[in-house]
Image (cartoon, helix red, strand yellow):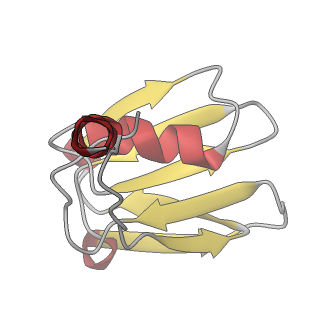
Amino acid sequence: MLKLSILILLYVKPIASILMKIYSTAWFQPIDINDHVVTLLAMPTIYACACQCLANDLCVTGTFFGNNQTCVLFSSHLSQGQINIINDTLVKVYNFPEQPSMSCE
């Protein structure tokens, strides 16, 4: 029984939560154009886009364009730019208020 318990503990991955704010029908425009980190194509969901942000040490904010599956990552916080309202429910801005030190699997 003890061996089974140890085996289970070795294969259980820790569960962590990350605070991510999402703004629907909006896109982000940083004040400084140099805060653009990268534009990624063929990103199927906002969560895949957010995972790319988590994997990049510079990224704290992103815009996901669902219509063309584009993910745009920025190194600026929301206070360092402007959230623009758009009449498209598939466009979303997300932000990590505190830059987490973890990535998606």
User: In the figure, residue 13 lies in which quadrant?
Assistant: top left
Residue that protrudes farthest toward the bottom in the picture: 79
User: In the figure, residue 95 lies in which quadrant?
Assistant: bottom left
Name the residue: 20% across, 42% down. 34
Residue that protrudes farthest toward the top in the picture: 42
Seen in the picture, residue 41 relative to 27 is either above or below; the reply is above
* Residue 83 pos. (x, y %): 51, 73
Residue that protrudes farthest toward the front in the picture: 1
Seen in the picture, residue 66 relative to 75 is either above or below; the reply is above
Left or right position of 5 against 84:
left
Name the residue: 31% across, 44% down. 1
Name the residue: 83% across, 63% down. 89
* Residue 69 pos. (x, y %): 70, 31
Q: Quadrant of the C terminus?
A: top left
Seen in the picture, residue 37 relative to 88 is either above or below; the reply is above
Name the residue: 53% across, 51% down. 63
Q: Nearer the viewer, residue 103 or 56?
A: 103
Left or right position of 79 against 22:
left
Seen in the picture, residue 66 relative to 28 is either above or below; the reply is above
* Residue 25 pos. (x, y %): 73, 68
Left or right position of 18 against 68:
left
Q: How many marks?
A: 0
Q: Nearer the viewer, residue 20 or 88?
A: 20
